[in-house]
Image (cartoon, helix red, strand yellow):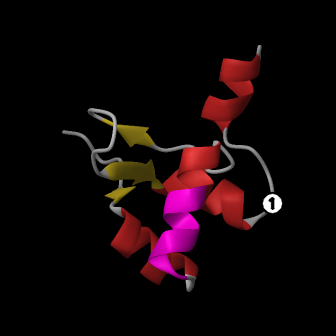
Amino acid sequence: MNTQLRFATSQAAEYAACHEQTIRKACESGELHGGQRKPGGRWSIRRECLDAWLDGAKCEHQIAGAA
């Protein structure tokens, strides 16, 4: 059973108490780690990535990708 919590941009915005466009722009710029199944598709953001972004840090996926 997969217990990872993922957010769509609207859910992430509500969780982070910011505008949905802020989340989308952060994902597009790479500031917030998120994924899309296809270019221009919906963003999927892991809770741990969103929490790291809110703390002003990089998530483990961004750190691993930079290595």
Task: Name the spot of residue 34 as percent of width and height, x first.
Answer: 48, 44
Q: Foreground residue, 47 or 29?
A: 29
Q: Is residue 7 left or right of residue 56?
A: left
Could you say which quadrant of the image residue 6 lies in? bottom left
Query: Which amino acid, by three-letter code, is at mark 1?
Result: Gly
Q: Is residue 52 left or right of residue 48?
A: right
Give the residue at x 67% y 32%.
62
Task: Return the residue found at the far front.
Answer: 40
Give the residue at x 29% y 51%.
42
How busy is the neighbourhood of tag 1: few (under 14 within 10 Å), some, or many (20 plus)? few
Task: Return the residue found at the far top.
Answer: 67
Task: Name the spot of residue 13 as percent of width and height, x first.
Answer: 47, 76
Looking at the picture, does residue 61 appear above or below residue 33?
above
Task: Name the spot of residue 57 as percent of width and height, x first.
Answer: 79, 52
Looking at the picture, does residue 63 appear above or below residue 10?
above
Q: Foreground residue, 44 or 2?
A: 44
The magenta region covers 19-25
Majority secondary structure of the magenta segment? helix
Q: Confirm whether the magenta stretch covers residue 5.
A: no
Give the residue at x 35% y 55%.
5
* Quadrant location, the C terminus: top right
Q: Is residue 14 left or right of residue 2?
A: right
Q: Is residue 47 left or right of residue 43?
A: right
Q: Secondary structure at mark 1?
A: loop
Q: Foreground residue, 27 or 44?
A: 27
Task: Name the spot of residue 2 as percent of width and height, x first.
Answer: 25, 40
The residue to which callout 1 is attached is: 56
Task: Return the residue found at the far left.
Answer: 1
